[in-house]
Image (spheres, grey):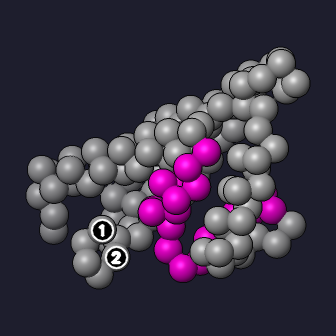
Amino acid sequence: MPSIESELEDVAKLRHIASEFAEGFNTGDVERIMRFYGDFYVDINLRNPVQSRQERRDYYTQVIRKGGFKVQVRPEEILIRGEFAFIRGTIELTPGSALSDSVRKELRYLEIAQRRQDGS
């Protein structure tokens, strides 16, 4: 059973990942985003929900290229169960250019993260 300290460290790392995702997205740095993805990703909001790492990279490249908004990621609840973490939160989309929709939008998300063999 993990200690409270190690669980707090894991929660801090997961919050850091959310921050890095937002920074990577907002600066157009797809590689910064992709550091945290495994070989496959499932996004149930997509027509083809299972994506390879390359397909996910291409997806983010396309979304960032279209531009028009910035993201802020707020993990609100993180549960760690063994090698898995369940992260529930909000993604706030804010208009980033005069060409974009002028309304701020919020999306809810649930991610499941898995600790790799190397501990990452």
Name the amino acid, label 1: Ser
Question: Decide: marks 1, 2 in contact (CB < 8 A)?
Answer: yes
**Is 38 colored magenta in this rendering?**
yes
On-image quarter of the N terminus: bottom left
Count how many numbered circles sit on residues in the image. 2
Left or right, 39 with reference to 97: left
Instruction: Name the residue that disc number 1 marks.
Output: 120
Residue 88: in sight, yes or no? no
Q: Residues within 10 Å of mark 2 (few under 14, many from 20)?
A: few
Amino acid found under the numbered disc labelled 2 = Arg
- Could you tell me residue 96's position as x and y percent? 72, 25
Q: Tell me which corner region of the image, top left, top right, bottom left or bottom right, holds residue 56.
A: bottom right
Is 83 placed left or right of 17 in the picture?
Answer: left
Residue 24 in picture, x, y percent from top left: 52, 45
Instruction: Mark yes or no: residue 31 visible.
Output: yes
Observer-nearest of 89 and 92: 92
Residue lying at 44% horizontally and 45% vertically, measured from the top left:
20
Q: CA distance from mark 1 to mark 2?
A: 5 Å
Q: Residue 26, how many percent across, how many down?
A: 59, 37
Give the quarter of the image for residue 45.
bottom right
Q: Is residue 42 above or below residue 67?
A: below
Q: Nearer the viewer, residue 61 or 39?
A: 61
Label 1: how many Cα within 10 Å (few below 14, some 14–19, many 20+): few
Q: Inspect the magenta stretch and tell me whether residue 10 lies in it.
A: no
Q: Residue at x 69, y 38 (%)?
A: 107
**Residue shown at the point (76%, 70%) measured from the top left:** 49
Residue 102 quadrant: top right
Q: Which mark is residue 116?
A: 2
Q: Residue at x 30, y 68 (%)?
A: 120
In this picture, which residue range is highlighted in magenta?
Answer: 28-46
- Give the SS element for disc 2: loop
